[in-house]
Amino acid sequence: MTPMMIAALGLLMVATAFLSGLFGMAGGLILIGVLLALMPLPTAMVLHAITQMASNGWRAFLWRAHIRWRPVANYMVGATIALAAWSLTRYVPDKPMALLLLGITPFMARLLPTNIKPDPDRLWQGTVYGTICMGLMLMTGVSGPLLDTFFLGGDFGRREKVATKAMCQLVSHFTKLIYFGGIIDQAASLDPVLAGVAIVASMLGTTLARRILEAMTDQQFIAWSNKLITTIACYYVAYGGWLLVRTPVLAAFDKGGLQ
């Protein structure tokens, strides 16, 4: 990549880390969409994993006093199950399917029966959500929207939501780095300068968001979080659907042009 492109991505990473630092969500979802448009999927996954490990790891450290460790342990059980299953299949979706999955995931938890309220403290729910979220992480690069919806259903304050989810995401992105960086057969080359910029930018954006999060109320946090999840999810459904329709049309056009 050119220095101009690296600088532009660095600014984007500061902005998305700021957004994630404020709401504990959305930043990674935006970033992976941009990376998928610029580079091959395995490379995008590795860069995204490094960026999000820096962002979530630093956020977990800043809010370490508010981490709820039981949900983290429950989530790790599910993540381990998913990694074992995906290591056997080594499935990597194409970009249209990845984008559609990104958009659909936020609505999955909302379709649950009303008598099954998400509760991160319950082992079976943490394991089920952990398995599904880790599976989505290995297919699409993020699981944030579904995990966001899960934590919004728990009896947590905004600081606890951000801190606990950051720890879960740190585990997820580290697992994704292992998967795309070593387990699957597709090579994922990454510029070390770009990786360094990603780490610094993510930590900077996360730090800048801390004071604003302190000033928010829990009600404002939940209201804005739900709006962000829905808006970004709808965009990815539309974008993924357009790519899915566009690809056969272009293929048919190219085939016709060769005849």
Image (tube, rainbow, N blue to C red):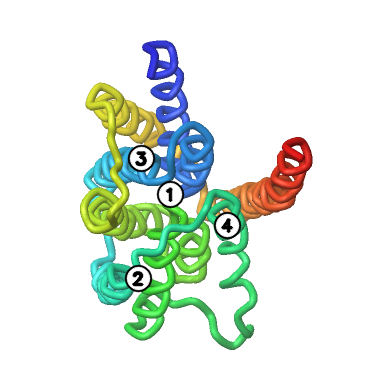
Alpha-carbon span between mark 4 and mark 1: 25 Å
Instruction: Please tell me whether mark 1 sits on a helix, a strand or a loop.
Output: loop
The answer to whether residue 231 shows anywhere in this view is no
The residue beneath circle 2 is 89
Tell me which label, 3 or 2, sits earlier in the chain: 3
The first of marks 1 and 3 along the sequence is 1
Question: Mark 1 to mark 3: distance in Å?
Answer: 24 Å
Query: How far apart in space, not on screen, are marks 2 and 1 (Cα)?
Result: 31 Å
Instruction: Please rate how many residues cluster around mark 4, counting C-alpha atoms within 10 Å: few if below 14, some from 14 to 19, many from 20.
Output: some
Q: Amino acid at mark 2?
A: Thr
Question: Closer to the camera, 116 or 52?
Answer: 52
Q: Secondary structure at mark 4?
A: helix
Q: Name the spot of residue 46 as percent of width and height, x first.
A: 31, 43
Which disc is residue 226 wearing? Answer: none
- Pointer 1 residue: 24
Q: Which of the two discs, 2 and 1, labels the residue nearer the N terminus?
A: 1
Residue 48 % position (x, y): 37, 41
Q: Amino acid at mark 1?
A: Gly
| Residue under the image location 28 percent in, 54 percent down | 185
24 versus 107 height, above or below: above
Q: Position of residue 10 (x, y in %)?
A: 39, 23
Tag nearer the camera, 1 or 3: 3
Q: Quadrant location of the C terminus?
A: top right
Crowding near pointer 3: few (<14 within 10 Å), some, many (20+)? many
Residue 16 lies, with reference to residue 148, above or below; the image says above
Q: Is residue 228 left or right of residue 248?
A: left
Q: Which residue is mark 3?
A: 43
Mark 2 neighbour class, 10 Å CA radius: few under 14, some 14 to 19, many 20 or more = few
